[in-house]
Image: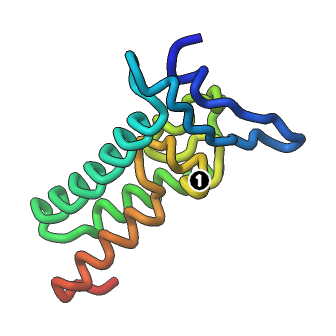
Amino acid sequence: MSGHESALPFVRKPGGTRHVLVLRPDRAQGEPGTAALLLQLAVSRQREFLADQTAAEILGEGRPLVDALDTLGRGVEALPMAVNPATASLYIANPLGGRGGRGIAGLFSTHPPIPARIAKLRAYDARRGIHY
């Protein structure tokens, strides 16, 4: 097992996997510790928001991005993908169905939840007088 997996213990329960977050100081030396990993993932999520805003500025509005993100979200809800749950956090939309991104599991996601991205893009458009 590589460093990150051993730092993230979990408990399986009927109907799904419940992750238990345990910050282990012994993992913080020599390789990225859990706290460092969480910080890196938080920065990644913030960069996604920045990328969305930059794209909206280039396009002149956020609506095309909202439409695309909504399509991605509806697609994985309608047809969940057969992926390893351990890699689900690396996808733009939760490939297991549902929009995800809440609770402990959201801390390990590289992308913000689609509804949060859509809300920020709509707010950006509303500030510019674009309503839909």
Crowd tier of the residue under label 1, counting other residues whose Cα lies within 10 Å: few below 14, some 14–19, many 20 or above: some
The residue under label 1 is which amino acid type?
Answer: Gly
Q: Residue at x 33, y 70 (%)?
A: 120
The x, y position of residue 73, in whole percent, is 52, 54
The residue identified by callout 1 is 100
The x, y position of residue 38, in whole percent, is 43, 41
Residue 126's quadrant in the figure? bottom left
The x, y position of residue 74, in whole percent, is 55, 56
Q: In this rendering, would 56 be left or right of 98? A: left
Image quarter where the C terminus lies is bottom left
On screen, residue 61 above or below 51: below
> Residue 87 versus residue 93: which sits nearer the camera?
87
On screen, residue 23 above or below 115: above
Q: In this rendering, would 132 be left or right of 47? A: right
Q: In this rendering, would 10 be left or right of 57? A: right
Q: Which residue extends farthest top?
A: 1
Image quarter where the N terminus lies is top right
Secondary structure beneath dot 1 equals loop
Q: Which residue is drawn at 58% across and 57% down?
A: 102
The x, y position of residue 128, in whole percent, is 16, 83
Residue 37's quadrant in the figure? top left
Q: Residue at x 52, y 24 (%)?
A: 26
Residue 30's quadrant in the figure? top left
On screen, residue 104 above or below 1: below
